[in-house]
Amino acid sequence: MDAALEEELYDLLTLCIQQPDSADSAKRKARAVEIGQELAADGGADAMESMFFSIEQRIQGEIGADARPYRAWWNGIAGEWKY
């Protein structure tokens, strides 16, 4: 399940980065938050950190963009997650 969630989150963030003013941006953010909630329920902030780090590296390497600003979308999901 984590691999499927990682791919989905990667796709969502990539689209948000490449099309920041898209009409679907709110839906993409909502789904990204749901993914964060699923990760937190399964493995807490450690699972969230692990997945986001992996995605940050992929996005940086593949499209040369910074995904770190999107970490804030997960604020409030786990107490230890504060970006």
Image: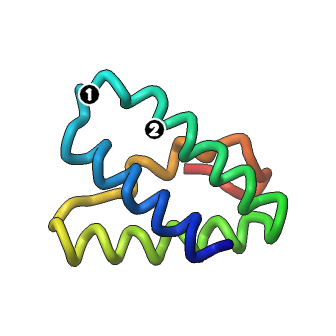
Describe residue 12's horizontal placement relative to residue 2 as left or right.
left
Labelled pair 1, 2 in contact (Cβ < 8 Å)? yes
Three-letter amino acid code of the residue under disc 1:
Ser
> Residue under circle 2?
28
Q: Is residue 18 above or below residue 11?
A: above
Q: Is residue 20 above or below residue 67?
A: above
Q: Position of residue 18 (x, y in %)?
A: 19, 46
Of the pair 76 and 28, the residue shown nearer to us: 28
Q: Earlier in the sequence, mark 1 or mark 2?
A: 1
Quadrant where the N terminus lies?
bottom right
> Residue under circle 1?
22
Three-letter amino acid code of the residue under disc 2:
Arg
Question: Residue most toward the right?
Answer: 41
Of the pair 69 and 55, the residue shown nearer to us: 55
Q: Position of residue 58 (x, y in %)?
A: 32, 75
Q: Position of residue 64 (x, y in %)?
A: 16, 67
> Residue 47's mark?
none
